Image (tube, rainbow, N blue to C red):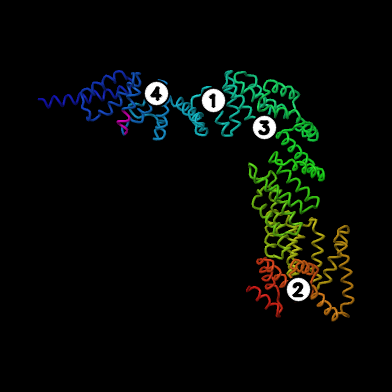
C-alpha cells in the first residue's frame, strides 16, 4: 500500500514539473514558479529533473523581478557549470546586474562569458523560446559599458568594436570618436566627434571639438578643422582646452592666409601670454610670408628678431632650407648653394632642415662639377638622415643616387657601385622608380666596364633593359661596345643593328653608327665602314660623330694608299709602339708606383694596343698591379677574362696559369 502511494507521489511530482515547464514555455511565470517550488519541496535533491527545476525557477524569479535573484543566479551557475541552463542563466544574471546598475560586476561577468564562448545569438531552446529577445536585450548596453571601460584603459582598438556595436549615448559616442582618433582613422573620428560635440556645451564637447579639428587637419580638411577649433575656442568650460583650441584656430587661419590671422594671434597672446604656445605664436607673426612661400620676406622678418631663441633659429634654418630648395628647383645653383651653406652654418637647430640642407648643398656641388665636395656633403646628409625619426632623408633615394654619380665622376668606381646598389635595394617599382632603377643598372654597368669586369657590366646592362625598356638603347650600345673590346666585331655589329631597329629615334643613333663603322674597320671591312661613316656625315651633319666619321674616311683612304708599301715597317713599328707602354708600366710597377703604372696601362689600352701579344701582356701586368694593391678579385677576373679570350700559343698562357694559382 505504501509503495503504491509513493508511486502516486512520484507521478504527481513529475506531472507538476512538466506542468511548470509548459507554463514557462507559455509565459505563465508566476504559476510556473509555484509549481517548481512545490516540486522542489516534495522531491529529493538528487532526483531527476531537480537541477532543471531549480534553473527554471530562477528564470521565473528573473522575469518576475524577485529580489536577490542576481546573486542567486551567480551562486547557482557556479555550482552547476555543466547544466544545460548554465549559459542562459549567466546571461540573465548579467542583465539583472545592469538593471541594478552593478556595472562592474556585469562587465566582469560579460568578459568571462566572452572568454568562455558563451553566445546566445540564436533562439533559445524549449521552454525558454519566448525569452530569446530578453536574453539579448541588454547586450547593447553591455557592449557600450565594455567599450567605455576598455577605452578608459587605453585599449582603443578593442574598445572600438564594442562601442560600434553597443548602445549609443553621448559619452559612448565621444569615446568611440576618440578611439577612431587614437587609431588614426581621422575621417570616422571627425564625424563621430562632431556629432557628440553638438549635443551639449561642456568639457566633453569642448574636447570633442578640439580633437575633431585635429582629425580634420590630418585629413587636410582645413575649413572643417578651422570651424571645429573655433567652436572649441568659444567655450569657456576648460581654459586649457580653450588655449589649445585658440592656438590651433590661429594656426589654421595662418595657413590659409586669412585676413583675421593677425588679430586672432594677438588675442591669443593677450589671453595666454605665459602659454607654452606663446613663443610659437609670436614667431608665426613674423612667418606669415613663409606660409605664402615668400621665403625671402620670411627671412627678412625672422632676421629682425634681436635675440632669437632656439625655436627662432630653427625656423630660420627651415626658411633657409626652403629658399635653397626653391632656388634649386629654379636651377639657380649658386643661390641655392649659398642658402644651403647658411642653413648648415646654423648647426643642428632643426634636425631635418639641417640634414636636408646638406643634401641640397651636395646636389648643387654635384651639378656645379665639384664632385669631391658633393660626395662629402651627400655622405654627411645621409649620416644625419639616419638620426632622424624616420631613419632617413625625405630625399633619401636621390641623395644615394647623387652620391653614386659623385663617386662615378671621380672614377671611384667601387664606391659608386656600393651607392647604386643601395638605390636598387630601396627604390620602389613605380613609373619614376623604374626609370631610376634602369639608370642605376646602367651606371653599375659603366662602373664594372671601367674596372674591366665585362661579365658584371654586361649583366647589369641586361637588367637595365628589363627594368625600363626606354633606357635600353644605351644598354644595348654598351653591350655591343663590350663585344668590340672582346674582339667580337661581328657580334658588335649585330647588336648595334638590333639597337637601331628597336630604337630608331634614339639620340644615340649617331654614336651607334660610328661604333658600327669602327667595328667594320677593325674587322677589315673598309667598304662597309666607309658606307656607314658617309651616312653619319650626311644624316647627322651637326653631330660630333659627323666630324669623327669624316676623319675615319680620310684615315681609311690614307691607310689604303700606303699600306702595301709600308706593311713590313709598319708591323715593326706597331710592335714597338705596342710594346713601349707595357715596358714603361713594368718599370713603374717594379718601382712600387702602382697607381701610375695602372694609369699608363689604362691609357694605352683605351688608345689601342695593336698587337694582341702586348695587349695580353698589358692585362697580365694589370692583374699584378691589382694584386699588389690588394684587389685580388679584380686581378683574378682580369686573368680569367684574358684566358677565355687569348688564343695565341705563347708564354702569355703560362703567365696566366702561374698567376691564377696564387
Marks 2 and 3 in Cβ contact (< 8 Å): no
Marks 3 and 1 in Cβ contact (< 8 Å): no
Q: Is residue 21 above or below residue 460?
A: above
Q: Quadrant of residue 532?
A: bottom right
Q: Which residues are magenta?
A: 76-81
Q: Residues within 10 Å of mark 2 (few under 14, many from 20)?
A: many
Chain-order first, disc 4 or disc 1:
4
Q: Secondary structure at mark 3?
A: loop
* 126 on left or right of 579: left
- Residue annotated with mark 4: 97
Q: Residues within 10 Å of mark 3 (few under 14, many from 20)?
A: few
Q: Quadrant of residue 10?
A: top left
Foreground residue, 54 or 241?
241
Chain-order first, disc 1 or disc 2:
1
Marks 4 and 3 in Cβ contact (< 8 Å): no
Q: Main secondary structure of the magenta part?
A: helix
- Outermost residue, bottom direction? 568
- Residue annotated with mark 2: 586
Nearer mark to the viewer, of 2 and 4: 2
- Residue annotated with mark 3: 220
- Residue annotated with mark 1: 173
Chain-order first, disc 2 or disc 4:
4
Chain-order first, disc 4 or disc 3:
4
Please indicate, yes or no, whether residue 33 appears anywhere in the rendered image: yes
Circle count: 4
Image spot of residue 112 (x, y percent): 40, 32
Amino acid at each position: 500500500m505504501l509503495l503504491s502511494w509513493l508511486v502516486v507521489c512520484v507521478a504527481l511530482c513529475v506531472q507538476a514539473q512538466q506542468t511548470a515547464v509548459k507554463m514557462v514555455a507559455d509565459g505563465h511565470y508566476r504559476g510556473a514558479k509555484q509549481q517548481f517550488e512545490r516540486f522542489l519541496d516534495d522531491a529529493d535533491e538528487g532526483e531527476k529533473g531537480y537541477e532543471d527545476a531549480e534553473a527554471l525557477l530562477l528564470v521565473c524569479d528573473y522575469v518576475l523581478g524577485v529580489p536577490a535573484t542576481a546573486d542567486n543566479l551567480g551562486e547557482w551557475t557556479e555550482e552547476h557549470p555543466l547544466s544545460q541552463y548554465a549559459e542562459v542563466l549567466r546571461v540573465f544574471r548579467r542583465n539583472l546586474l545592469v538593471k541594478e546598475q552593478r556595472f562592474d560586476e556585469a562587465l566582469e561577468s560579460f568578459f568571462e562569458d566572452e572568454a568562455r564562448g558563451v553566445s546566445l545569438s540564436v533562439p533559445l531552446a524549449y521552454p525558454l523560446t519566448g525569452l530569446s529577445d530578453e536574453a539579448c536585450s541588454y547586450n547593447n548596453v553591455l557592449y557600450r559599458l565594455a567599450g567605455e571601460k576598455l577605452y578608459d584603459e587605453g585599449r582603443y582598438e578593442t574598445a572600438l568594436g564594442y562601442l560600434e556595436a553597443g548602445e549609443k549615448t553621448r559619452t559612448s559616442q565621444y569615446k568611440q570618436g576618440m578611439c577612431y582618433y587614437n587609431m588614426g582613422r581621422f575621417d570616422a573620428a571627425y564625424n563621430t566627434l562632431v556629432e557628440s560635440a553638438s549635443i551639449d556645451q561642456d568639457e566633453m564637447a569642448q574636447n570633442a571639438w578640439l580633437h575633431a579639428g585635429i582629425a580634420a587637419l590630418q585629413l587636410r580638411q582645413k575649413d572643417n578643422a578651422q570651424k571645429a577649433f573655433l567652436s572649441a575656442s568659444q567655450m569657456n568650460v576648460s581654459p586649457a582646452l580653450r588655449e589649445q583650441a585658440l592656438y590651433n584656430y590661429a594656426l589654421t587661419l595662418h595657413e590659409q592666409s586669412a585676413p583675421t590671422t593677425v588679430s586672432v594671434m594677438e588675442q591669443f597672446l593677450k589671453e595666454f601670454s605665459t602659454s607654452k604656445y606663446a613663443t610659437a605664436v609670436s614667431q608665426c607673426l613674423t612667418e606669415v610670408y613663409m606660409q605664402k612661400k615668400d621665403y625671402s620676406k620670411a627671412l627678412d622678418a625672422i632676421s629682425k628678431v634681436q635675440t632669437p631663441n632656439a625655436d627662432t633659429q630653427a625656423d630660420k634654418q627651415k626658411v633657409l632650407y626652403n629658399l635653397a630648395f626653391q632656388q634649386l628647383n629654379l636651377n639657380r645653383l649658386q643661390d641655392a648653394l649659398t642658402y644651403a651653406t647658411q642653413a648648415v652654418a646654423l648647426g643642428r637647430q632643426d634636425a631635418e632642415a639641417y640634414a636636408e640642407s646638406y643634401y641640397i648643398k651636395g646636389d648643387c656641388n654635384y651639378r656645379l662639377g665639384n664632385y669631391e665636395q658633393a660626395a662629402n656633403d651627400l655622405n654627411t646628409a645621409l649620416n644625419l638622415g639616419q638620426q632622424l625619426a624616420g631613419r632617413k632623408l625625405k630625399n633619401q633615394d636621390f641623395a644615394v643616387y647623387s652620391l653614386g654619380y659623385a663617386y662615378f665622376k671621380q672614377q671611384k668606381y667601387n664606391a659608386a657601385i656600393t651607392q647604386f646598389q643601395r638605390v636598387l635595394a630601396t627604390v620602389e617599382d613605380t613609373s619614376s622608380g623604374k626609370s631610376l632603377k634602369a639608370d642605376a643598372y646602367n651606371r653599375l654597368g659603366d662602373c664594372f666596364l671601367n674596372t674591366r669586369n665585362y661579365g658584371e657590366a654586361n649583366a647589369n646592362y641586361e637588367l637595365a633593359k628589363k627594368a625600363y625598356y626606354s633606357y635600353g638603347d644605351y644598354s644595348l650600345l654598351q653591350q655591343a661596345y663590350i663585344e668590340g673590346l672582346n674582339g667580337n666585331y661581328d657580334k658588335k655589329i649585330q647588336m648595334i643593328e638590333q639597337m637601331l631597329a628597336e630604337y630608331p629615334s634614339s639620340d644615340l643613333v649617331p654614336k651607334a653608327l660610328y661604333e658600327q663603322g669602327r667595328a667594320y674597320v677593325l674587322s677589315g671591312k673598309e667598304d662597309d665602314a666607309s658606307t656607314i661613316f658617309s651616312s653619319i656625315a650626311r644624316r647627322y651633319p651637326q653631330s660630333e660623330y659627323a666630324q669623327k666619321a669624316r676623319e675615319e674616311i680620310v684615315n681609311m683612304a690614307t691607310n689604303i694608299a700606303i699600306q702595301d708599301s709600308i706593311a713590313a715597317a709598319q708591323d715593326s713599328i706597331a710592335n714597338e709602339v705596342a710594346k713601349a707602354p707595357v715596358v714603361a708600366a713594368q718599370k713603374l710597377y717594379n718601382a712600387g708606383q702602382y697607381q701610375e703604372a695602372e694609369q699608363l696601362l689604362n691609357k694605352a689600352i683605351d688608345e689601342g694596343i695593336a698587337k694582341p701579344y702586348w695587349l695580353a701582356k698589358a692585362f697580365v701586368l694589370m692583374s699584378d698591379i691589382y694584386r699588389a694593391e690588394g684587389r685580388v678579385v679584380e686581378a683574378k677576373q682580369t686573368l680569367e677574362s684574358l684566358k677565355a679570350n687569348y688564343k695565341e700559343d705563347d708564354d702569355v698562357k703560362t703567365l696566366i696559369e702561374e698567376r691564377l694559382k696564387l
